[in-house]
Image (cartoon, helix red, strand yellow):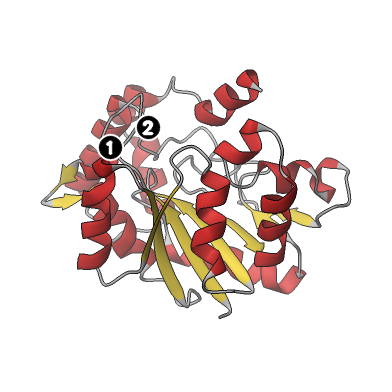
Amino acid sequence: MEVLAITQARSGSTRLPNKVLKTIGGFTLLEIHLQRIQKSSKIDELLVATTVDELDTRIVEIAKNNGLPFYQGSIDNVLDRFYQAAKEFQPKWVVRLTSDCPLIDAKLIDSIIDYAIEKDVDYCSNTLNPTFPDGMDIEVFKFSALEKAWKEAKLDSEKEHVTPFIHKNSTFNGLDLFVSCNYESDKNFADVRLTVDEPEDFEVVKLIIEKIGLDKDWKEYTDFYLSNKEISELNGSSKRNEGYDKSLKED
C-alpha cells in the first residue's frame, strides 16, 4: 500500500468529554471528520485508531457504519496504538490526522501528501512552523520513520503522542536522524482556531457549520471565522497544543 491515513479518536478528554461524539446537524463530529477525509484522492485507505476502553465502543460502531477499518489499542501509549494500527498494512507513507479536527480539508491533505512524496522526506507536516489554522493539522511520514520511533522512543511525551520523537530528531531541528520539511501557507493563519478541544471550540464549529455548511474548504472556513468577530472571540484566547505541552512538563 502506498498511502494509509490514520485518524486518532477516543471518547476520553479532560477538557471536553466525548467531544468527537457531539452532534451538529444530525452528524457526530467524528462522522463529519471521516466524511471530509474520504474526499481525498491520494489516500488508499483510511483507518480509525481508538482504544480498548469500553467508552470507545461507539467510535468502533461509527467506523463500521462508514465502512472503515479500525484498530483498538493502548489508552496511554498512543505511539504504540498508532504503530500497531499501521503495521498490518505496511504502507510506504502514513498520514496522521486527529478527530478533534472536524473541518479537515481533503485537498490540503492531498497537497501535503504530494509535497512529502516530491521531497522524499521522512516527515512532512504543516505543524513544524504552523501557518494553517489550528484544526487543519496534517502530518505525512514514512512508515519506516514511524517504526524507528516506535522502537527507540523512551520519554512518556514521545509515547503519549505519535510524532515528537520524529520531528525532535529531524533536520528541521538541526538533527539528522530524520529528514523533515514544513508545508506553509502563503499567509499566516496560525491564530485561527477551527479545532474542537474546549466547549467554546465546539460552539465556534457549530456556528460555522450552521451558517455556511459542511462542503467548504479550509480557506472559506478561515475567512468566515476572521470576518465574524462574534465567532472568533469565543475561542480566540485558547492555546495551541496544550496536551503536548502538558506531557512535556510531566517528563
Q: CA distance from mark 1 to mark 2?
A: 8 Å
Q: Is residue 182 left or right of residue 74?
A: right
Q: Element at badge 2?
A: loop
Give the labeled residue for mark 1.
Answer: 19
In the image, 137 versus 55, the foreground residue is 55
Q: Position of residue 242 (x, y in %)?
A: 51, 26
The residue that disc 2 covers is 197
Residue that appears at 44% across and 19% down? 237
In the rendered view, tell whether residue 34 sits above or below residue 39: above
The answer to whether 181 appears left or right of 91 in the picture is right
Residue 14, compared with residue 20, is above or below; it is: above
Tell me if mark 2 has few (under 14), some (14-19) or many (20+) residues whose alpha carbon lies within 10 angstroms of its own. Answer: many
**Can residue 69 be seen in this snapshot?**
yes
Residue 52's disc is none
Identity of the residue drawn at 32% across and 60% down: 34
Q: Is residue 226 left or right of residue 213?
A: right
Q: Nearer the viewer, residue 177 or 197?
A: 177
Q: Secondary structure at mark 1?
A: helix
Measured from the top left, where is residue 232 in percent x and y? 36, 29
**Figure quadrant of residue 197:** top left
Q: Which quadrant: the N terminus?
A: bottom right
Question: What residue sits 41% from the left and 65% below the top?
Answer: 47
Dot 1 amino acid type: Lys
Q: Position of residue 78 (x, y in %)?
A: 52, 44
Residue type, numbered disc 2: Asp
Q: Are marks 1 and 2 in contact (CB under 8 Å)?
A: yes
Which residue is rendered at x = 71% and y = 52% of the image? 151
Q: Nearer the viewer, residue 228 or 61?
A: 61
Question: Of all residues shown, which one is farthest toward the bottom?
Answer: 1
